Image (cartoon, grey):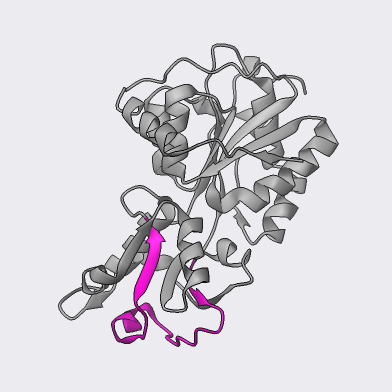
Amino acid sequence: MIKPIRGWNWGTLLLCLVVALVPACAPETNLGEKDVVLVFAAASLQELVEEIGQNYQQSHGIRLIGNYAGSNVLAQQIQASRAADVFLSANTQWMDFLDGAGCLESSTRLDFLSNRLVLIQKKGAGIQISDLSQLPEASYKHLAIGNPEAVPAGKYAKAALVSIPSGGQTLWDTISDQLVPTLDVRSAMTLVESDPAVLGIVYQTDAATSDAVEVVLTIPEEAHPSITYCAAAIKRQQVQPKAIEFLAFLTGKTAAKLYQKHGFRMMAPPRLKDTVPGELRGSP
């Protein structure tokens, strides 16, 4: 079974934010477990990665340990400690951040999944709109989104709201007083689950994990930049073949079936074995 890490707190986050100001990665943390792959994954990937972990342990005898949070938080944790083996980000920006800091095995980077944005409400709330442009007239108090300054889902949501004109300004400007930024996309959904007066913009796959919310509308893909999940191995002093092997698993047929099951769309990543140097490939 994959075991989520629950030890991160605000003190840890503050430390990570401070260390993130340093342009290079901190010395790596040595976990000392050869039969474990530590995966830092965007919050929206949790259920998927947990099921992948179960399959991977059965087929490879290697256990996955997952740490789930906003991609921005995870990237700063990795820069502070390099404790992870693999990073799964909900956008390319935070992968670029780590790559620029020298924290990644750059040749292992993969763009492998896509998603959709949806507007959600608490089940039975009864808010009826067919287009985001109707938000100024809708009966709700707040719109919860991931923090648009850092959280990928929030960035995509802001882009969608900015793209829509509203009374001589953008829709983002029109409803700015009703916006509630959250730590990550799952926190936005939690607010919606708890209050019928709160709407939220989350990933389609997030909404599918909750029995307490329902989709009001699906946001057109052309309203925001393409949603791209990417993966990479973390650079260590010693090569980590276990990380490369896990990334290769993510491009295979078993993983593809799980992506479909959880509502993600698989992109067409290259065969990892063909993209990485021979010394990083590990056993065939």
Q: Which residues are magenta?
A: 117-146
The residue shown at (55%, 35%) is 7
The residue shown at (59%, 16%) is 30
The N terminus, quarter of image: top right
Q: Is residue 67 above or below residue 282?
A: below
Q: Is there any visible trace of residue 225 in the rendered image?
A: no
The residue shown at (66%, 16%) is 32
Image quarter for residue 54? top right
Q: Position of residue 157 (x, y in %)?
A: 38, 62
Image quarter for residue 138? bottom left
Q: Which of 112/242 is in front?
A: 242
Left or right? Give the position of 25 relative to 83: left
Left or right? Give the position of 183 relative to 44: left
Q: Position of residue 37 (x, y in %)?
A: 67, 29
Left or right? Give the position of 190 relative to 250: left
Q: Position of residue 36 (x, y in %)?
A: 71, 27
The residue shown at (65%, 34%) is 247
- Seen from this angle, which residue lies furthest top? 237
The C terminus, quarter of image: top right
Is 68 a magenta residue?
no
Q: Is residue 123 above or below residue 32?
A: below
Q: Which of 195/264 is in front?
A: 195
